[in-house]
Image (cartoon, rainbow, N blue to C red):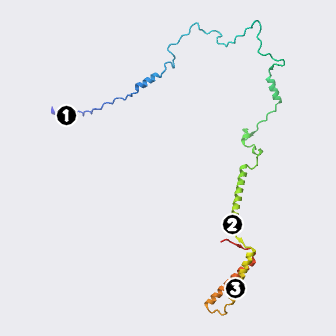
Amino acid sequence: MATQSAQKGASDPPPRPEQPGKPARYISKYREFVKHEAVKNKSQWKTMGPAKVAVPSPNDFLQKHSKEPKLAPKKKEEDGKKLLPLSVPQRTYRPVIRIKKNFIIKNAVAVIRGVPKKPRPFCVDTRQGDKYPLEPSGLVPKYIKKKNYGVTPKYVTRRNEEIKREEEEYEASVLEQLKKKAMKTLSEEERTNILKALKKNWEEINHAYQGLPVLTDTRYKKIHKEELELKLKQLEHDIAAIEKHKNIYIADV
């Protein structure tokens, strides 16, 4: 018996764990208020009409010509005399008599006397006769018939004037800069004074050169003689250049 109970206990499945219960459903505290507002704003007769409708009386039936417009009642004559109008027309008054016009004859006369319409120009581009209006096609020379055709636009002339003015201002500024940097010319009086001074220096150096000894046996004598010769040569070159050119320019250093 013990073995049978042990076998039964081994074959039985394990007990299931207890599942927790579901939480209570959420209910808003404004639920009753919303229901009341929804019922309050509804109108019961909005689509179907009232529950009971007043039935018309059988005496109030629709009579004949009751819906036709009625004219105002005529004024009765007072004491057997007719009522006169408020104002009597003058003797020169001529009433306007409207004559019916015959529009058929009028239209016929207008067509006979009218100028015939010109046919619209077309452009045919295929041999099957496919055509399209000529004016919007771009083949009609419209622009050459304008009054201002070939005339330079105002903005172009204005731009050219501005460019020309800028070029003139630039040239004037360049000339002014060149004038500032240009070399100065010697006057005739300054030229003669410089020439006299050079000749005087040449005479003094030549006099010193003539006073040198004939025999130059030392190094100092040779160097002194060469210096005098170079000075004489430079002075002769300067004197010849000044005598040759009348206009002499001096650059600003």
* Mark 2 or 3, closer to the camera: 3
Q: Earlier in the sequence, mark 1 or mark 2?
A: 1
**Snapshot quadrant of residue 12:** top left
Residue drawn where x is 71% and y is 71% of the image: 184
Can you say whether 27 is above or below 52 in the image? below
Residue 46, how many percent across, how many down?
Answer: 51, 20
**Snapshot quadrant of residue 209:** bottom right
* Mark 1 or 3, closer to the camera: 3
Residue type for callout 1: Gln
Residue 177, how many percent across, how many down?
Answer: 68, 64
Residue 108 in view of the camera: yes
Q: CA distance from mark 1 to mark 3?
A: 157 Å
Residue type for callout 2: Lys
Disc 1, disc 3: CB below 8 Å? no
Residue type for callout 3: Glu
Q: Residues within 10 Å of mark 1 (few under 14, many from 20)?
A: few
Residue 162, how many percent across, how many down?
Answer: 70, 54
The residue that disc 1 covers is: 7
- The residue nearer to you, when weighing 165 against 17, is 165
